[in-house]
Image (cartoon, grey):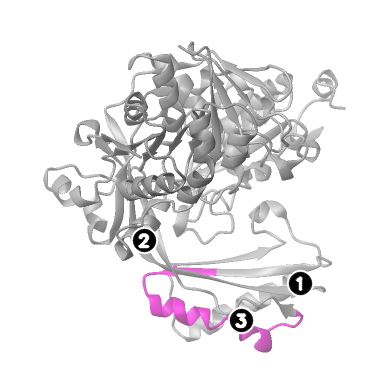
Amino acid sequence: MKIRLTRLAHARSGDKGDTANVGLIALREEFYPLLMREVTAERVKKHFTGICQGEVERFELPNLGALNFLLHESLGGGGTLSLMTDAQGKTFSTALLRMEIEISDDESRSLALL
Amino acid sequence: MKERIRIAAGQGFWGDLPDAPVRQVEGGPIDYLMLDYLAEVTMSIMQKQKARDPNAGYARDFVPLMKQIMPACVDRNIKVVANAGGVNVEGCAAAVREVAREIGLSGKLKIGIATGDDILDRIDELITRGVELRNMDTEEPLSTVRDRIQSANAYLGAAPIVEALSKGAQVVITGRATDTGLTLGPMIHEFDWAADDWDKLAAGTIAGHIIECGAQCSGGNCQYEWQSIPDLANVGFPIAEAAPDGTFVITKHEGTGGRVNVPSVKEQLLYEMGDPHEYITPDCVADFTTIQLADAGADRVRVFGIKGRPATDSLKVSISYSSGFKAVGTLVYAWPDAYEKAKAADRILRARLDRLGLKFEHMLTEFVGANATHGPLAGEPSRDVAEVQLRVGVRGNDRKGIERFTKEIAPLILTGPPAVTGFAGGRPKVEEIVAYWPALIPKSEIQSRVAILEV
C-alpha cells in the first residue's frame, strides 16, 4: 500500500544560502527504519524535480529518529537575491511530507498503520 | 558555584515579539536574558544607518527595552547578553548608559562591550596580505566584489562575553557574536568550563542553538500536533536550565502558552542544520548525532549525552555587498478560472516586456494559491479555486529596467483578463539587493576586545 509521509513524520526546514535543509523526524521511533529505507537522497531529489536544481545530501540522526536533507540550488539564489515567496525554504518541510512511499501490508499491520 | 542557571531567550531575530524579553524577566526566576538581534543582512542595514548618522548602527529598540527592564535586572541580578551592538557597539552601550543614568541606576551596574568583529576597514589590507576571503559557496575571491562591500564582520564566539561577565558586567553588548555564544558564554562564566572541555562547550552551544530562535522551540512554527498547542497568543519563550556537568533542561515560564516537548525541541534542533556531525562555531565543533532527549515533565525536556570536538582555526566572516536591484509586482484574479486568468496576464506582461526590449538577470512568476510554495508538487489547481494571486519578480543590475517593469503591473487591470484586483498598495518598490558573502578568516587575524563602562 501507499502511505504519505504525513502519517510517519513531522518536519522543519530552513535555509543556508541557496541550499534548503529539511529535517524529517519520525512520529514514532519504530517508523525511523522505514524512513531510512524509503526516503533516500535519490527519492528526495526526484520528489523535488523542478524545484531542486542541485544535489541532495542525506544525513542520519538515529538518536533523534531523524534524517536531515540538504537540497542544493533550490532557493532561486537564496537570501536577498531570491525572488521566491519562500526564499528561505520554510515550506519545504511540508513539501517533503507530500511524498508517498510503498510499504507491504504486513509491514503496515506490524506498524499499526492499516 | 551555582548548581544550575536559567538562561532565557528574549528575541529570535530583530523584530521578534517586542514584549517577549519583558515577559521573560517578569514571568519567573531567570539568571540571564539572551537577546539575538543579528540576522545575516542586518549588519548591512546597520552599516547604512551608521553612514547617515554616526550615532546609529545598532538595534535601537534595545535601548528603550533596557530602560524598561534594567531596574528589575539590577534588583534581581539578572544579566543581559545581547548582540544588539551591530556595527556601533560603543554607541549602543553609550545609549544604554544614558538611559540607565536617567532612571537612577548610576553606580549600580557595569556595561561590558565586546568588539573586534568589524573588519570593514581592514578588507584591503587583508586582501593585500593574501587573505582572500573566498566565498564559501562559490569559491570566488572577495576581490571580485571589493568595490560593492557594505559590511564585513567576523563571528566572535563566547570568549569576549565570558571576559565581560568576569569583569562584573551586568549587561554585555556585542556586535557580530554568534547566536550560540550568547548562551554558551554565561555557562562558561558560571561553571568555569575549561577552554578545551569540548563536550561541555558543545552542550552549551547546542543549548544556544535550541533557544536562539525564540519560541520556535516552544510551540511556534511547530508541526507536531500544532492544532493542540495551547495559547500561542501568550506563547512562552524558551529557557535553558543548565547544570555544571553540561546537561540542561529546555523549559518555559509557568502559566505561559505554547509547548515544550521532545518533538518541539527536535524540530528546532534540525532547523538550518547542515552536516549534523559537525556544527562548527568559534568555540567548538558540536556533534548533533550525540544529543539525547528525554521528557522531564510538563514543558520540560532534558538534554544530555552531547559530544564535541576541538574548535577549528578559522572564524566565519559575514560580508554584505550590493548586488543589483529587484522588484515584485502582484495582482489578484478571482473565480472562475482564476488560475487561467493569472497565467494569461503573465503571458501578456511578458510579451509587453519583450516588446520593450527589457532583459533581466532573473524573472520569476508564481501563482499564489496554486504553486508558490510547493511548485509542481502542488499539482494543477481546481478550476473552482476562489482566487489566485499573480506574483512576478524581476532582478538585475539595471535599475532603470527594473523601474520600467514596475510600471507594467497596474495597466494589466484595464488591459488584461477580467475579475482582477489587489493593487491598492500602488506601484511595486524597487529594492536595492544587499547580498551575503560567507567566508572564513584565520582566527589569528581577529582580536576581540572587551571594555567596561561604569554607569
Q: Residue at x 35, y 61 (%)?
A: B48
Residue A66, horizontal then vertical, whole percent: 62, 26
Question: Do labels 1 and 2 touch, CB within 8 Å?
Answer: no
Question: Circle 3 — which element?
Answer: helix
Task: Give the spatial CA distance, label 3 vs label 2.
Answer: 40 Å
Give the left or right position of residue A113, taking residue B362 as reference: right
Residue under circle 3? B348
**B342 versus B99 height, above or below:** below
User: Disc 3 is attached to a residue of which chain?
Assistant: B
The magenta span reads: B393-419
Can you say whether B188 is above or below A92 in the image?
above
Q: Nearer the viewer, residue B302 or B452?
A: B452
* B387 to the left or right of A57: right
Give SS at disc 2.
Answer: helix
Distance between the alpha carbons at the discs numbered 1 and 2:
43 Å
Mark earlier in primary sequence (3, 2)? 2
* Disc number for residue B338: 1
Which residue in the protein does label 2 denote? B49
Outermost right residue: A114
Q: Are the residues flagged by discs 3 and 1 in contact, CB closer than 8 Å? A: no
Are the numbered discs 3 and 1 placed on the same chain, yes or no? Answer: yes
Q: Position of residue B371 (x, y in %)?
A: 67, 59
Instruction: Give the number of the disc on residue B197.
Output: none
Kind of residue sitting beneath label 3: Ile
Q: In front: mark 3 or mark 1? A: 1
The answer to which of A74 and B435 lies nearer the viewer is: B435
